[in-house]
Amino acid sequence: MAVIVPHSTYTEFKNAVLGRGFDMDGHYGYQCWDGVELLYQQPDIGQHLYTAFNFDQSLSSGVKTCWLYAPARAVNGSGHFSEVTRVQDIKQGDIIVLNQYSGWYGSTGHIGFADEDYNGTDYINILGQNQGAGDPEHGSPFNIMRSFLGAAFLGVFRYDGWASTPPTPPTPTERTKFPWVLYARKLRSK
């Protein structure tokens, strides 16, 4: 049975998962991958987050391969999701994929949700699992942590259900000129 969480907005999703842990595949506890897979598996979305391992079991299952392995990236960025390649375009709720980077992310990389729009620095707040101090056996549940983007940034999967579109400007109505001349004639005739 699928784990269902409210997710009509990023804020609703964050409030539903913060402090909770989800093990979607039954392996290794609360992995960062599981946190994103939770959104992908919601019944109205009905997708999966793929790594290279899903295509060829001789390849790495590291979460970074969901972006680096082209067939996985194409599937992950389709359906209800799109790809964003520029760090400057990160929006709150985007799924950020990070490569391994010395002192930050192990050989598998990291993945989580941007908890803010890109702020012009090499650091961003990420909502994710298995980040920071946590239970070494089960991983840490969802938390928000300041994370390094810099050289580790690979790309973003954007859930189209959270993509905000600018409001449609009101259609100007054509105003007819008031017939002042006729009104003035009518007043004079009284």
Image (tube, rainbow, N blue to C red):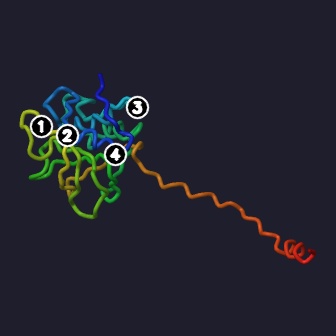
Residue drawn at x 36%, y 41% is 77
119 sits left or right of 110 in the view: right
Residue 20 in which image quadrant: top left
Inter-mark Cα distance, 4 to 2: 17 Å
The reply to whether discs 4 and 2 touch (Cβ–Cβ < 8 Å) is: no
For mark 4, give the secondary structure: helix
Q: Which residue is mark 4?
A: 10
Q: Which residue is mark 2?
A: 32
Q: Residues within 10 Å of mark 1 (few under 14, many from 20)?
A: many
**Nearer-N-terminus badge (3/4):** 4
Inter-mark Cα distance, 1 to 2: 9 Å
Mark 1 residue type: Gly
Q: Nearer the viewer, residue 62 or 119?
A: 119
The circle on residue 81 is: none
Q: Which residue is mark 3?
A: 44
**Nearer-N-terminus badge (4/2):** 4
Residue drawn at x 30%, y 57% is 87
161 sits left or right of 173 in the view: left
Q: Residues within 10 Å of mark 2 (few under 14, many from 20)?
A: many
For mark 3, give the secondary structure: loop
For mark 2, give the secondary structure: helix
**Nearer-N-terminus badge (3/2):** 2
Quarter occupied by the C terminus = bottom right
Q: Nearer the viewer, mark 3 or mark 2?
A: 3
